[in-house]
Image (spheres, grey):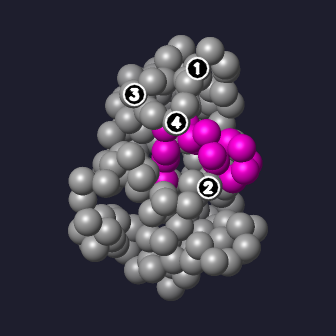
């Protein structure tokens, strides 16, 4: 089983919301970009919320997120996993959130992109790292593996959590 490593955070010092995934999937790792699977709804949702549409160049999408006060990262720094399913993640190591929040003091809300991100954060980060006061909210996963909710329903929950930011 191979050891996988997540990407660096996408954030600037003015960020107020942090969106956390668990660990990039196989296709995202291959492409070296967040939410790279063409059927993942993340960029479609971000397009509708802040204008970071999937058709835009990746660097432009990231710039739009940052200018909208949104930071993006993963809970896990590394793990072992075959394939892309969160259920197959083993031997997790968390990212250094104490250092991250020290560099990004305006973040007050953390939104988890799915239940695995929230579970991993609560297990490996909360109460293990010194964190500022934060609000937490789990959002429906944008992963194509979690297709049990219609896009419109996911978008409504994401909009309520993130809010219109443009």
Left or right of 97 in this view: 85: left
Q: CA distance from mark 1 to mark 2?
A: 19 Å
Q: Is residue 126 above or below residue 114?
A: above
Q: Are marks 3 and 1 in contact (CB under 8 Å)?
A: no
Pointer 2: what residue? 36
x, y percent for residue 88: 45, 24
Q: Residues within 10 Å of mark 2 (few under 14, many from 20)?
A: many
Pointer 1 residue: 80
Q: Quadrant of residue 62?
A: bottom right
Residue 84, label in figure = 4
**In the structure shown, which secondary structural element does the residue marked by tag 1 occupy?**
strand
Residues under numbered marks 1 and 2 in contact, where contact means CB atoms less than 8 Å apart: no
Write the residue at 56% across / 24% down. Answer: 82
Which callout, 1 or 2, points at the residue further toward the start of the chain?
2
Q: Nearer the viewer, residue 32 or 60?
A: 32
Q: CA distance from mark 2 to mark 3?
A: 19 Å
Q: Return the mark for residue 87.
A: 3
Give yes or no for residue 26 being in the magenta stretch.
Answer: yes
* Rendering coords of residue 135 (x, y %): 34, 50
What segment is highlighted magenta in the picture?
19-33
Classify mark 4: residues with Cα within 10 Å, few (<14), some (14-19) or many (20+). Answer: some
The one of 70 and 28 positioned closer to us in this rendering: 28
Q: Quadrant of the N terminus?
A: top right
Q: CA distance from mark 4 to mark 1?
A: 11 Å
Q: In 3D space, how far apart are the residues under numbered discs 4 and 2 (Cα atoms)?
A: 12 Å
Mark 3, Cα crowd under 10 Å, few <14 / some 14-19 / many 20+, is few
Q: Secondary structure at mark 2?
A: loop
In reply to whether residue 102 is colored magenta, the answer given is no
Q: Is residue 72 visible?
A: no
């Amino acid at each position: 089983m191979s050891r996988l490593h997540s990407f660096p955070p996408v954030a600037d010092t003015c960020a107020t919301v942090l969106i956390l995934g668990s660990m990039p999937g196989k296709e995202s790792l291959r492409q070296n970009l967040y939410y790279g699977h063409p059927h993942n709804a993340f960029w479609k949702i971000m397009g509708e919320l802040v204008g970071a549409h999937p058709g835009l160049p990746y660097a432009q999408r990231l710039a739009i997120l940052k200018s909208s006060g949104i930071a993006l990262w993963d809970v896990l720094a590394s793990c072992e996993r075959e394939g892309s399913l969160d259920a197959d993640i083993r031997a997790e190591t968390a990212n250094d959130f104490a250092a991250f929040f020290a560099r990004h003091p305006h973040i007050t809300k953390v939104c988890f992109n799915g239940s695995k991100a929230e579970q991993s954060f609560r297990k490996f980060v909360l109460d293990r790292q010194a964190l500022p006061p934060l609000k937490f909210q789990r959002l429906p996963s944008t992963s194509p593996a979690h297709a049990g909710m219609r896009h419109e329903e996911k978008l409504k929950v994401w909009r309520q959590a993130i809010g219109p930011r443009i």
